[in-house]
Amino acid sequence: MSFFEMRHVIVQFGGLCAVCDFSIALSAGQLVGLIGPNGAGKTTVFNTITGFITPDEGDIFWQGENIRAYPAHRVTASGIARTFQNIRLFADMTVLENVMVSFHYSIQSDFLHAMVGSPKYRRVEAEIREKSRRYLYELGLGHLSSEKAATLAYGQQRRLEIARALATGPKLLLLDEPAAGMNPIETIELAALIRLIRDKYGVTVFLIEHDMKFVMGLCERIKVLDYGKSIAEGTPTEIQKDIKVIKAYLGSGYYAAG
Amino acid sequence: MTNTIFLQQLVNGVSVGSLYALVAIGYTMVYGILRLINFAHGDLLMVAAYAAIFGMGIFSNSWIAFPLAIIITGCIGILLDRTAYKPLRNAPRISLLISAIGASFLLENLFLVIFGGVPKPFPRPDFFASVIDIGALRIPVLTIYAPIITILLFLGLLYIVYRTKAGKAMRAASRDFETTRLMGINLDRIIALTFLLGSCLAAAGGIMWAMKYPQVNPFMGIFPGIKAFVAAVLGGIGNITGALVGGFLLGLGEIMIVALMPELAQYRDALAFVILILVLLFRPRGIMGETIVE
Amino acid sequence: MSSDFQEQSGAVQVRGGLTHRQKTLLNVAALLCCLGILALFSRYGSEYHVRILNNMAIFITLAVSYNLVNGVCGILHLGPNAFVAIGAYTSALLTLSPSEKQINFIINDLIWPLSIVQVPFALSLVAAGIMAALFAFIISFPVFRVRGDYLAIVTFGFGEVVRVLCNAAQSITNGPLGLKNLEPYTNLWWSWGIAILTIVSITKLINSSYGRAMKAIREDETAARAMGIDPFRQLLLAFLISAFFSGIAGGLLAHLITTISPTLFMFTLTFNLLIIIVVGGLGSTTGAVIGAILFAWGGEALRIVENPMDIGIITIPGIPGMRMVVFSLILMLVIIFAGHGIFGRNEFSWEMLARICLRGGKRVGSP
């Protein structure tokens, strides 16, 4: 049994096949990229894994369990976290609060303790606050903890999303276009950060990205998706040479941005 | 229950249903474009009834007074959008809804202040007042005319929506608001047209409602309004034909259930909500509409 | 500012100069101050003032618990009138003496266990809260399947259904006649005691992890789900707590006016609560309190427009409906031109008070 595996997953939108017979297996600690032309169904794969879409057919095995029908919050609780392509922060809450939300599903105290402010609950709260601060410092956002999330710069917002996802305590982290809209320097920093996260927290990272230089430099394995179908899988060097991949990209008029 | 009473109720149900349908179409049209439940829509029914009373007072001719009342109500519909909804196009949903509720209360109480709370009798023109006998059935002609007028108005609406340029723009806007804006279509004008058409239909419904139940008061629009909304959801919100079908079904269902089980009569007003909840639970897209549960 | 408030519940050291202990001291002082004022009023206040103060406290309880659902969770729930009705009827039926019940129920007899029970007021209030929460629990399953406009109309529907039931279920509610001759148990201590309890416990909840989860749902439900939050559970929690306190407030209301009937619990009640929390600032408990105070006071002041007015020579006749015209205009103007209300989403804190005093009280937390 592999660490994480999708077997023959099919997702249809009104007769249209968004993901067709998609299979993939990840081993623990890997850095894996998912690439493909626009509209290939990459985000749909992520939405399917994280429980926002239930696949029409196929199974998703995660740590020995079939999670295909889990609702989103249960998938997260089982150890899979994600970020979003179009940043989705809790805009009117502070940076610190954004991260603190991630601990909610795991708190061991009931709401009555919270309502009377019992010492037991205050300990829980202090602990959450402390842990959240640590994640923020780790991602270089410590000095911003009392700012409203909406006021952060773009790159900071992306990093806050990662901090928030990391705070849910995942073993598998899905990043949906983490480098989108970043300048080259930020992109290099991000690659270093993702490696650090993988090494320090021991999470497996599965990411979608259009920036080929970023993907090829960072990922150990790459999966290529086109029209909902997997057309290639391998190491960056294998993928770069793969004739089907080149066709898919050139055929759709897409050039890898550098 | 005898066949005669059954038939009588059947006809009555169709007639009430046609009025729900007229109001429901307005809900569905506005929802289709703005994704907003126009809480004040039912009150336009009351506005039309008052306008008609005053028109009759001045012209004492229903052929002038009623169309005039319909046009006035249509204009008030546009005014409603301009004052209560337009400033909030980019605001959070909850603000828009609260504004709609405020507008509804404002209309009701403004009319209460102006016209007082005492119900006014509605002058029923002779044309609609007679009763015809079919065998043992005694049916007021209004009961027959209401569905016919509804169908005629509906066909007129279909013509506008499917055969004219403005109608095409309306359909485009309900598909994709932003893209339509980018295509250079004047959305404000399309929205105004939507409110105008919806309000005119509600006004026609309101005048017939007032002839059927000739007690006009500032709060008379609330329940027909809510039921019409339920009809729109039942038919599938955003779908004009669905609203028509939903209206007929709701009217018929409501009258028939009470006819078959008279002990439920006092719960009649709650019945619509039970239907609404059942639809949302088991068939959220209604009979022929888009899905609303994410 | 809202973060100041949160710091208080967690860490000891607080930004802005005040320690946790100092704040607690200030809070206790403020509370004692309130109690002193209440004692003065319940001793020397006129009947009129006492009534307004009681109304105020009940509106505060209702508005703060309504704001938990509408302001903090960000959904438009339109059925709090149902919660209040259930609380009022529950509590009234439990405190009326069996003989009084017989006098009340002249058309239909009250059904059996209710016809003989009589419990103390305090217990009846708890029962009122529990019954309202039970009702909230039952309706939550259809209600939280939908969002936005649909949730609004479904909750509105349940509010109406409860009113219809109050009229129809005569052997429980006595129908349109209502219940009369309740003991006037509600006094300033009861009403303000419950109001303060509500404010404190709901504020603590909002500032806890539960409150954060609720706000996260308001801000972005999809993201909240991705962070492991089950929206149904959080919304249900807010809904139940809100219903519980609204039910208690209903019990207080019943024993304040001593006569209840279905017309008391029409949609207008919900509308009034909506104005309160919108004017105060959706999502702010402080706003809800201030809004309720303004409403109880302003509503009383506005009564004059509906009563005949006698200015020396001429008498201006009262205009029924004028009050609601003013209220709906206020609601629309605030939502269109000042969507954040008085407080926005900010909360009262001692630091804020200090800042205002130092600055000469010019600005009250703009968002």
Image (tube, rainbow, N blue to C red):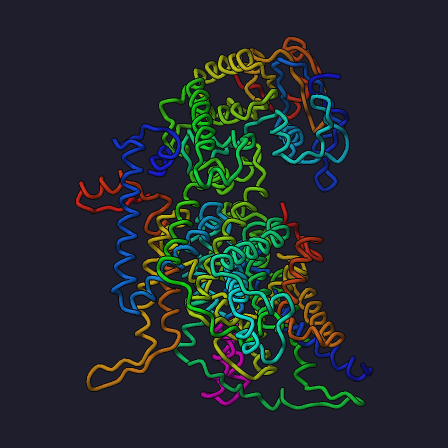
The residue segment tinted magenta is: B44-73
Q: Is residue B196 in view from this perspective?
A: no
The outermost residue toward the top is A237
Name the spot of residue B288 as percent of width and height, x first: 70, 56
Name the spot of residue C70 as percent of width and height, x first: 47, 50
Q: Is residue C343 in view from this perspective?
A: yes
> In what quadrant of the picture does the C terminus of chain C appear?
top left
Q: In which quarter of the image is residue A175?
A: top right
Query: Is residue B243 placed above or below C100 in the rendered structure?
Result: above
Q: Which residue is drawn at 27% across and 63% down?
A: C43
Q: Residue C335 in magenta? A: no
> In what quadrant of the picture does the N terminus of chain C appear?
top left
| In front of the other: B137 or C75 | C75
Magenta segment, prevailing SS (helix, strand or loop) = helix
Query: Is residue B132 placed above or below A165 in the rendered structure?
Result: below
Name the spot of residue C361 as percent of width and height, x first: 20, 46
Name the spot of residue A60 as percent of width and height, x first: 72, 27
Figure disc tally: 0
Query: Is residue C46 placed above or below A47 in the rendered structure?
Result: below
| In front of the other: C52 or B217 | C52
| In front of the other: B76 or B119 | B119
Q: Residue at x 45, y 58 (%)?
A: C249
Horizontal placement of A156 versus B163: left or right?
left
Q: Which residue is drawn at 65% across and 71% down?
A: B267
Q: Quadrant of residue A213?
A: top right
Horizontal placement of A246 versus C355: left or right?
right
Q: Residue B48 in magenta? A: yes
